[in-house]
Image (cartoon, rainbow, N blue to C red):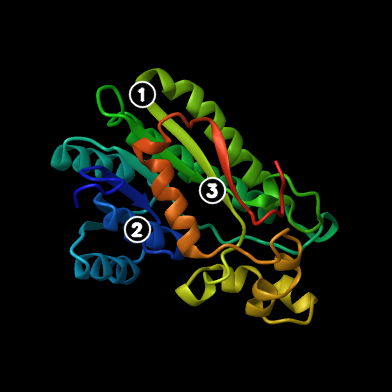
Amino acid sequence: MSGSLLEDKNAVIYGGGGAIGGAIARVFAREGARVFIAGRTREKLDTVARDIAAMGGRVETAQVDVFDQQAVEKHADAIAATAGGIDIALNAVSVMHDQGTSLVDLSLEEFMRPIDGFLRTLFITSKAVARHMGRERPGVILTLSEPGSKLAIGGILGHAVSAAGKEAFSRILAAELAPGNIRVIGIRPHAAVDAPAAGSYTKDLFKQTAAAAGQSVQELLEVGGLAQGTLLKRLPTLSEIAETAAFLASDRAGAMTGTIANLSGGALVD
């Protein structure tokens, strides 16, 4: 695809069958990248792959447990051997966790679930791809966090600490990998308004919060507290997140690293 943002780039997306991962995979492919999507659920991966193939894009799928470090490293090695290297990597893996329970009722296990889950997969995937990136071919690692990284509201203790941890991880990794010509950029979207309809785990994640407000999850996202807490009075769409990711992964954003792209609709103002 001549003139495309990601022409001839090799991109691996972990959690590529999910709502955000799938949306980004489709846009990456549209922009000329050869896309490798990995995840736990074959059916979800195949759905995304069919969409990409239908528009003439290049895609390969792999069923990979991102908690299995050996399996992730083997998969990254295989991509590099096949494609000649990895140019772009994104971890869009979701870890189901609690939102809505305050400290007095929160168990240690539930507090630690998102912290250990998200950061463990981020470490494993970043370590696996970094050795196949950079030097003469610029590399980009994209991470995903949430506005909870900076919001001071009750009931999201484990979630917020994990989000802040992901952003700290990205900053430090950017400093480590910059000499090797690898950029690391965090993307901080708010909850995507159309994610539940695309099969996202947020349709279950926000049930407790929505019920407390007397709303359905979709009402919470479209007109409820999450949307009203933003300056724009709306939440981002999957398309907006994916298009931003494509730009950040491209050479047009070549001067950006060690920073966070804020897609919170103004829920946070930097």
Where is residue 259 shown, x and y percent of the image?
Answer: 56, 34
Which badge, 3 or 2, comes first in the chain's sequence? 2
- Residue sitting farthest toward the front: 3
User: Badge 3: how crowded within 10 Å, few (<14), some, or many (20+)?
Assistant: many
Q: Which residue is mark 3?
A: 118
Where is residue 51 shown, x and y percent of the image?
Answer: 27, 70
Res 249 quadrant in image: top left
- Assign a secondary structure to mark 3: helix
Left or right placement of residue 144 versus residue 27 in this view: right
Q: Amino acid at mark 2?
A: Val
Left or right placement of residue 210 versus residue 113 in this view: right
Where is residue 1 shown, x and y percent of the image?
Answer: 19, 52
- Assign a secondary structure to mark 1: loop
Q: Which mark is residue 181?
A: 1
How many numbered marks does the figure carry? 3
Q: Which mark is residue 48?
A: none
Report the residue at 47% width, 73% height from top.
199
Q: Which residue is mark 2?
A: 27
- Assign a secondary structure to mark 2: helix
Report the residue at 53% width, 73% height from top.
196
Q: Amino acid at mark 1?
A: Asn
Q: Nearer the viewer, mark 2 or mark 1?
A: 2
Q: Is residue 92 visible?
A: no
Q: Nearer the viewer, residue 114 or 25?
A: 25
Q: Is residue 262 visible?
A: yes
Q: Nearer the viewer, residue 56 or 126?
A: 56
User: Badge 1: how crowded within 10 Å, few (<14), some, or many (20+)?
Assistant: some
